[in-house]
Amino acid sequence: MAKLRLVISRRLLIAALSALVFTIVFTIALFSRSVFTRPDDLDEIVREGQTASDTGRPEEALRLFAKAASMAPEKVPSFAADYAWAYLVEGYASYMAQDWRRADECYAKTVEIWPEMRAPLADAWVVVRDFVLDDKLEAASRAHGRADWEAITKYARATVEIAPDSIAAHYFLGLAYQWSGARERAAAEYRNVAKGSPASSGLDDLCRAAKAVHMSHQFNGLTPLHPLLAKAEAGDFATYEDTPFIVHHHNIELAKRTARALKYYLSREGVGGFLPALTTLPVACHVYLFRNSREMAEAAKYPSWQEGYFDAVAYRTRGDLTLCLAQDAPGMLDVTAAHELGHVRMALLMGREKRVPLWLEEGIASAATPLMTRRFYCEFLTGPRAEGKILPASEVMRFEIKSDVKEAADIEYAECMAIASILAEKDANAFRTFVSGVKKRQEAVALKKAYNMTLEDLDKSILIWAEKNRGR
Ligand SMILES: [Zn+2]
């Protein structure tokens, strides 16, 4: 009897426990369901997707938008432009990593989701399609009999349709026709490129003439400006606050996105842990979004090619944090905002008295940009290597900002970034010692002391590092 009672009470206990567990699970399920399907939850996911696109994380952005689309398919039109923009950023990242096929796919998705982008994106899209076509033609020429020429010429014709005025697109269509045996069509395409060729020219002459015209044209794979960045109200700055940032702007949507991007950067460690992750700042940071770089240059007396700046003088004299950005600059959020905030973070770390050599200051700010941006810098380094344009570290350390030569500055910024990254990634503590001890023109001494390295050792590691970090 006692045994039976024990069994019964055990059963009762198990039943009671099961009921309890069921209630808990059911409550959690109900609760989480109510959390995940709140009407503003979709808005939050879309906002996170925007920030991911704006801060150089297109893969994360695409994942978030795909999630939003599966949650509420009927709402897709309300965030289609942002979804398309994430594809555009992913396409551009793929282009920079020389993954032409992925770039082509992404640009096609951009235009499919947001047809208004077709014209603004046409030039950049044709550039990647010509690379794809070049690869296709090369592969086809190796297996001529087995190549699917119909598919290749169809692809080339579709490329011309994207940008009917593109010289490259007509030239490549001509090649596709010629190689597939459609000689008359090929001649027509070549004549379209090498206008005014003599009527008697043979196909090979026409091809050569068209190639010469094609080669003399610069191609530009840069993507268009985000339509949101292009909008600017007339009149004085309006103000939008999202602690710790006070954004002075001519476009409220852009101001909100800028604040979110800056808060995201601030919340992450930077430069191999050298810049700490912060949730706030000791004083508010004023961010001025100028309508264009001309207005910004006039206000700041800075070189006109600069796309943003941190007011170091205001910080040293009064402790104010002020950063300025030009909203007509491509990469305002994923490059310039992160870079200028890097200066702000560096200033806070070093204090108002301490100054570091300019090359190191710029190197750290550039290394504080998103991974996608730093990969672009690596392309700057590995590209000019072939042309012998890489400077020795000792020369990079004499870096000055000159007002008229932007192109040289790109490579110098990239090299400064590479050196700061190499040293920080090697040993964050040694990097702190190096940064606090280094003086202008005394870099070799500080390097020896902190890392037991010479400037020549550093030279050797720059290209190795760039090669390792380029691509995807
Ligand atoms: Zn800078």
Image (spheres, helix red, strand yellow):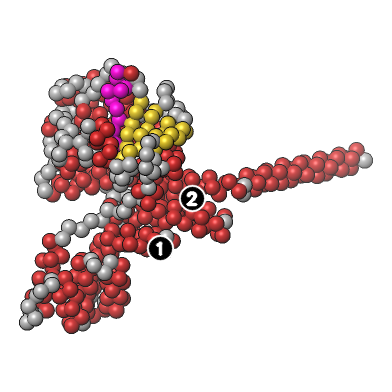
The quadrant of the image that shows the N terminus is top right
Residue 290 seen in the current view: yes
Q: Looking at this view, is 64 or 446 the one in front?
A: 64
Identify the residue at image location x=31%, y=53%. Answer: 224
Q: Which mark is residue 115?
A: 1
Identify the residue at image location x=27%, y=46%. Answer: 376
Q: Is residue 300 above or below residue 355?
A: below
Q: Residue furthest top?
A: 353
Q: Looking at this view, is 156 or 137 the one in front?
A: 156
Q: Which mark is residue 76?
A: none
Q: Nearer the viewer, mark 1 or mark 2?
A: 1
Residue 122 position within the rendered picture, expressed as x and y whole percent measured from the top left = 30, 62
Q: Amino acid at mark 1?
A: Pro
Q: Which mark is residue 64?
A: 2
Q: In the rendered structure, does residue 208 fall within the stretch colored magenta?
A: no
Identify the residue at image location x=19%, y=21%. Answer: 439
Quadrant assignment, res 438: top left
Q: Is residue 413 left or right of residue 232?
A: left
Residues drawn in magenta:
307-317
Question: Mark 1: few, some, or many residues within 10 Å (few <14, many ≥20)?
Answer: few
- SS for callout 2: helix
